[in-house]
Image (cartoon, grey):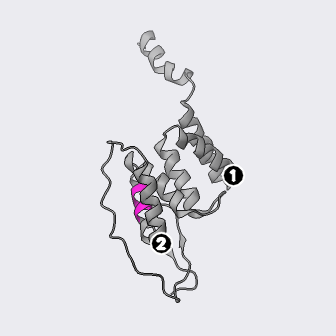
Amino acid sequence: MVRPLACLLLAVPLLLPAPPAAADYAKGIAAYGQADYATALHEFSAGAANGDPQSQYMLGTLYEMGLGVKQDFVEAWVWQSKAARAGIPEAIDARNTLEGVMTPPQRAEAAAAEAMTPPVATAELPPAPPTDTTTPSETSRPIQLVPRTGTVVVPGGE
């Protein structure tokens, strides 16, 4: 026999509107899946501003890849770092990958932005790799980051 109170308690969450950040994220994912990066940027930005770590991760991915926005590794690192502090494993990987391709001035700018962000005691960040003080050689080639895998693709490379 089904108990009426149990049915009511199970149905109540379905009747309530989704939290704004979750709604923003769902709309952003739908837009991202349709390659509508301008809408995805808008939705993930709203969710990220509301503190949704998944939206922060995806916003960082858009900046990392330059999808719907000018590619900006520093901005990508800032959003990936926020998501990483909230415990999103992909964000930790993405942030560490970004640190490996950022120039020393970009890493310094990202560190300054991180210093202005209040600490969040939700997840422990793994240690950052040592800062490289060498300058790129004249044989350096541009790279393309692939989201979520951390794979680095060097155009024209073997």
Q: Give how far apart the Cα atoms at labels 1 and 2 are.
A: 27 Å
Q: Is residue 102 visible?
A: no
> Residue 132 location, x and y as percent?
38, 75
Residue at (40% x, 63% y) in the render: 96
Judged left or right of residue 94, residue 130 is left
Residue at (64% x, 61% y) in the render: 70
Q: Write down the region rendered in magenta.
A: 91-96
Q: Is residue 102 magenta?
A: no
Name the residue beneath numbered marker 2.
Answer: 103
Few, some or many C-alpha atoms within 10 Å of disc 1 (few <14, some 14-19, many ≥20)?
some
Q: Is residue 38 visible?
A: yes
The dot on residue 70 is none
Q: Is residue 94 magenta?
A: yes
Name the residue beneath numbered marker 1.
Answer: 38
- Which SS does the magenta portion mostly show? helix
Q: Amino acid at mark 2?
A: Thr
Secondary element at tag 2? loop
> Residue 69 location, x and y as percent?
65, 58
Tally of marks:
2
Q: Quadrant of residue 135 in the image?
A: bottom left
> Residue 95 location, x and y as percent?
43, 60
